[in-house]
Amino acid sequence: MSTEKHSHRALIGFDKNGVPTVIVPADHHAHTHEDEHGHLYTHIHEAEFTADYMQAVNDYRKTFPKAEEVLEKTTDPAVKEMLVRMKELDMPTAFDRFDSQQPQCSFGLSGVCFDTPHA
């Protein structure tokens, strides 16, 4: 039995659309180690994988602009005019809807949401 240190943590990254995803999956098999007293113990690294994944989702969430930031940073004058006019008419945009849904659900951000959209 090897007592080498190793890790079975998945590597989390972002896909081409910026969505957090597993780049290299973890090897979730149970394995045995020997502790400093010579006792054997068996474990898996699922908790570390989950923590890494949730951290990636939280980091991704911080990159989403608020509706006001979209209005301030857009370079297209037609888009800016449309957003200003919709605000004047009190018509919510997708950006306003997104802001109203904060905090975002980590399941939905990761693409595994089980909730159906409401009309």
Image (cartoon, helix red, strand yellow):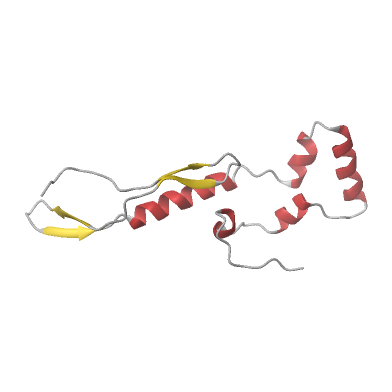
Q: Residue at x 47, y 48 (%)?
A: 55
Please tell me whether residue 100 is drawn above or below residue 2 in the rendered image: below
* Lateral position of residue 23 relative to residue 73, left or right: left
Q: Which of 71 and 11 is in front in this view?
A: 11
* Lateral position of residue 73 relative to residue 34, left or right: right
Please tell me whether residue 101 is drawn above or below residue 87 in the rendered image: below
Q: Nearer the viewer, residue 71 or 40?
A: 40
Q: How many marks?
A: 0
Q: Residue furthest top?
A: 75
Q: Which residue is drawn at 66% across and 68% down?
A: 116
Residue 42: image quadrant is bottom left
Residue 82: image quadrant is top right
Q: Residue at x 86, y 44 (%)?
A: 83
Please tell me whether residue 82 is drawn above or below residue 76 in the rendered image: below
The spot of residue 80 in percent (x, y) is 86, 38
The spot of residue 10 in percent (x, y) is 38, 47
Q: Which residue is drawn at 89% across and 55% down?
A: 90
Q: Which of 92 and 108 is in front in this view?
A: 108
Residue 106: image quadrant is bottom right
